[in-house]
Image (spheres, helix red, strand yellow):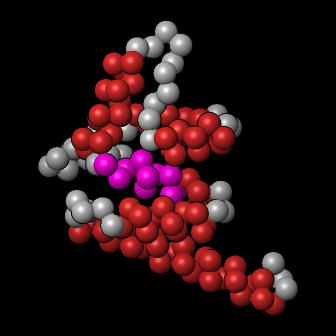
């Protein structure tokens, strides 16, 4: 969930839509939505609605969609890609201490997963 200024909950149009695609069994559309960071034009929808959803996401936390994308990639076992996304997010200038700690914990987790993969590969196990 995103946070409005002052820590109040908000929503993210792109992240919510991507999660819906993933939950409905369409990981390709989910990934496309995360990568774009936008809500596609829906049949019968208006450009204004789409732009409003994107503005909400940017206004509450400009890195939220990227952070959710990192989690999506990690859940798919795509640890190196996920790590790159989290490293990019970690450079966001507006991270508060709690966000920075959470992002760093994810980076450390992914580094450990990648390290384990390398050990298995070197021994011919994986």
Residue pictured at 55% horizontal, 35% vertical: 20
The x and y percentages for residue 38 are 44, 35
In this view, the residue farthest toward the left is 6
Q: Is residue 37 left or right of residue 57?
A: right
Question: Foreground: 38 or 106?
Answer: 38
Prevailing secondary structure of the magenta residues: helix
Which of the 4 quarters of the picture holds residue 121? bottom right
Q: Give the left or right position of residue 38, taking residue 97 as reference.
A: right
Q: Quick check: can you spot residue 23? A: no
Up/down of 41 relative to 44, above or below: below
In the rendered image, residue 30, in percent from the top left (x then y), is placed at 58, 40
The image quadrant where one finds the C terminus is bottom right
Residue 107 is left or right of residue 99, and the answer is right
- Residue under the point 39% across and 24% down: 50
The percent coordinates of residue 119 (x first, y second) are: 71, 87
**Magenta segment, which residues?**
62-71
Q: Residue furthest right?
A: 124
Say which residue appears at 40% left-offset and 14% top-offset.
46
The vertical placement of 117 against 98, above or below, is below
Residue at left offset 49%, top offset 21%: 41
Whether residue 26 is visible to the viewer of this picture, yes or no, is yes
- Asked which quadrant contains residue 98, the reply is bottom left
């Amino acid at each position: 969930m995103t946070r409005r200024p002052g820590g109040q909950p908000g929503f993210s149009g792109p992240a919510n839509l991507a999660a819906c695609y993933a939950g409905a069994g369409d990981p390709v559309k989910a990934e496309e939505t995360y990568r774009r960071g936008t809500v596609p034009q829906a049949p019968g929808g208006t450009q204004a609605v789409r732009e409003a959803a994107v503005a909400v996401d940017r206004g509450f936390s400009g890195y939220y969609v990227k952070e959710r994308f990192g989690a999506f990639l990690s859940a798919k076992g795509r640890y190196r890609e996920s790590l790159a996304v989290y490293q990019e997010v970690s450079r966001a200038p507006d991270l508060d201490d709690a966000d920075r700690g959470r992002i760093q914990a994810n980076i450390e987790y992914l580094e450990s997963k990648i390290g384990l993969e390398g050990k298995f590969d070197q021994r011919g196990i994986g």
